[in-house]
């Protein structure tokens, strides 16, 4: 959407093709996944207008300040209805109740300036002749011609990676991270971070406390990811045969829980056992395998496998699970056995270290849910450093998180601007 806005500034008329529904209709499709555990494949937490960002947590803090104009992204968001405080906050946050209206306002700007936006329009093939892309074909049979194609389909669009693979369009493996969601009572995190005596609540003026934890164990990073103070764990699957967890919060961040991804870096060599069958997409097969294991162990619908942190550390199935924010619920399961040993060992060591930094982090109240697999793309769609075009396909511009050039809302938005400038 940011690429579309910048195209219009530059006098280029964009056609935005979106497999999912508009943000309002999409909201209704979150009910079946939350309440019945039924995934609507093209309309969910990842797919639909605004992409994964629309019902995300909306944390806008980024360390990718060298990649582009962070402040101008905040300004564009404010111009489309985001709260002005994101311009000055050290850790700006919008919240998933406010984001959909911002996304809709961006769409209205695109339409008002002459762009096109087509919903429920899933790209299923590329029109390529003599090494140049000149359009796309959609699942409903329509085709769209264009001078250039910006491929910004996100890291959950596995059908697009498969399409690229089938067409022998060069893809590269890259490192990514997978793990679990970890959740605690927000009061526990507040007490440690704000030094509040046990049993007392944080003063009303203070926001729900956050944390960031990171270490390196045997050459692999172990770190917290997308921490959501006062948030909710949500089901982020895009197909019915998988369970994927992620986190979000509302603008007021007032749920009684604090959740975060707790992930381990996965290098291409860790996915070797999937190479024979899946080639360059071995990392995606690795993710999918964990997601299917979570589905089986979760016990139906979008129920997730869960384990108390203490039991994960000592290798026991939990007799009971603590209260949690995850609406579909969870089933007690041996996460330490479900995840590959290289991950489990590093995560255990990491958690023990983090338990020394945040008292109570590894105690009875800590809960792990499996699996957090959609943190970053296991695949890069290569592009030339200067022209930003794919090295084999003239006028194909890989963009954003799915192509491996962003990790989060702001860096994906900046990449969109950069690509539009290169068109
Ligand atoms: C629950 C949740 C919470 C998150 N919280 C945060 C956060 O607090 N802060 C943060 O920075 N990031 C967060 N993220 C991650 C963030 O949303 C992504 O990093 C970001 O959205 C990536 O942007 P993108 O445009 O590259 O890809 P996406 O947002 O994935 O967008 C890709 C778009 O392409 C569409 N598409 C896919 N395939 C096709 C096709 N074949 N045809 C047509 N359209 C297609 C999809 O429907 C989607 O709209 C969160 C994600 C989730 C799921």
Image (cartoon, rainbow, N blue to C red):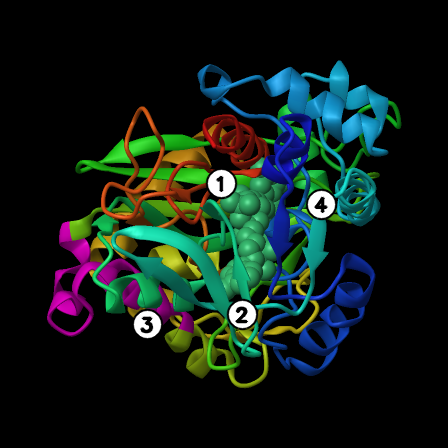
Above or below, 63 relative to 223: above
Residue interval drawn in magenta: 269-291
Give the camera-side residue of 155 and 13: 13
Crowding at mark 3 (Cα within 10 Å: few <14, some 14-19, many 20+): some
Disc on the earlier residue, 1 or 2: 1
6 and 20: which one is in front?
A: 6
Name the one closer to the observer, 202 or 157.
Answer: 157
Q: Quadrant of the N terminus?
A: top right
Image point 75% across, 41% down: which residue? 110
Give the left or right position of residue 261, taking residue 16 as reference. left
Q: Disc 1 versus disc 4: distance between alpha carbons?
A: 35 Å
Left or right: 40 in relation to 361: right
Judge whether 263 appears above or below 74 on screen. Answer: below
Q: Are marks 3 and 4 in contact (CB under 8 Å)?
A: no
Q: Residue at x 30, y 69 (%)?
A: 337
Question: Residue 209: x percent and y percent?
Answer: 69, 30
In the image, residue 1 sits, relative to residue 214, either above or below, namely: below
- Mark 1 lies on residue: 225
């Amino acid at each position: 959407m940011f690429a579309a806005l910048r195209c219009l500034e530059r006098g280029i008329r964009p056609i935005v093709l979106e497999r999912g529904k508009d943000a309002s209709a999409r909201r209704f499709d979150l009910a079946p996944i939350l309440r019945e555990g039924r995934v609507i494949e093209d309309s969910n937490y990842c797919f639909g207008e605004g992409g994964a960002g629309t019902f995300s947590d909306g944390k806008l803090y980024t360390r990718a300040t060298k990649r582009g104009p962070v402040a101008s992204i905040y300004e564009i968001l404010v111009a489309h209805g985001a709260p002005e405080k994101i311009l000055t906050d050290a850790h700006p946050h919008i919240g998933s109740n406010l984001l959909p209206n911002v996304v809709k306002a961006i769409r209205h700007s695109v339409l008002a300036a002459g762009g096109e936006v087509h919903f429920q329009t899933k790209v299923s093939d590329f029109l390529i002749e003599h090494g140049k892309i000149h359009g796309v074909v959609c699942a409903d049979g329509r085709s769209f011609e264009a001078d250039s194609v910006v491929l910004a389909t996100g890291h959950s669009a596995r059908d697009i990676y498969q399409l690229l693979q089938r067409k022998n369009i060069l893809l590269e493996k890259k490192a990514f991270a997978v793990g679990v969601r970890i959740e605690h009572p927000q009061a526990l995190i507040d007490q440690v971070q704000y030094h509040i005596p046990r049993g007392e609540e944080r003063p009303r003026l203070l926001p729900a406390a956050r944390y960031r934890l990171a270490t390196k164990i045997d050459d692999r990073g172990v770190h917290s990811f997308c921490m959501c103070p006062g948030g909710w764990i949500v089901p982020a699957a895009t197909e019915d045969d998988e369970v994927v967890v992620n986190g979000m919060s509302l603008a007021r961040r007032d749920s009684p829980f604090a959740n975060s991804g707790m992930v381990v870096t996965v290098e291409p060599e860790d996915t070797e056992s999937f190479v024979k069958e899946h080639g360059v997409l071995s990392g995606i097969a690795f993710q999918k395998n964990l997601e299917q294991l979570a589905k089986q162990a979760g016990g139906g619908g979008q129920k997730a496998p869960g384990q108390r942190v203490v039991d994960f550390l000592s290798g026991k199935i939990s007799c009971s699970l603590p209260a949690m924010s995850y609406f579909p619920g969870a089933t007690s399961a041996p996460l330490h056995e479900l995840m590959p040993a290289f991950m489990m060992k590093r995560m255990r060591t990491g958690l023990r270290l983090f338990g020394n930094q945040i008292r109570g982090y590894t105690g009875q109240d800590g809960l792990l849910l499996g699996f957090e697999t959609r943190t970053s793309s296991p695949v890069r769609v290569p592009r030339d450093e200067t022209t930003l075009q794919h090295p084999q396909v003239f006028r194909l511009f890989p963009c954003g998180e799915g192509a491996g050039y962003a990790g989060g809302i702001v860096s994906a938005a900046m990449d969109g601007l950069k690509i539009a400038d290169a068109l």
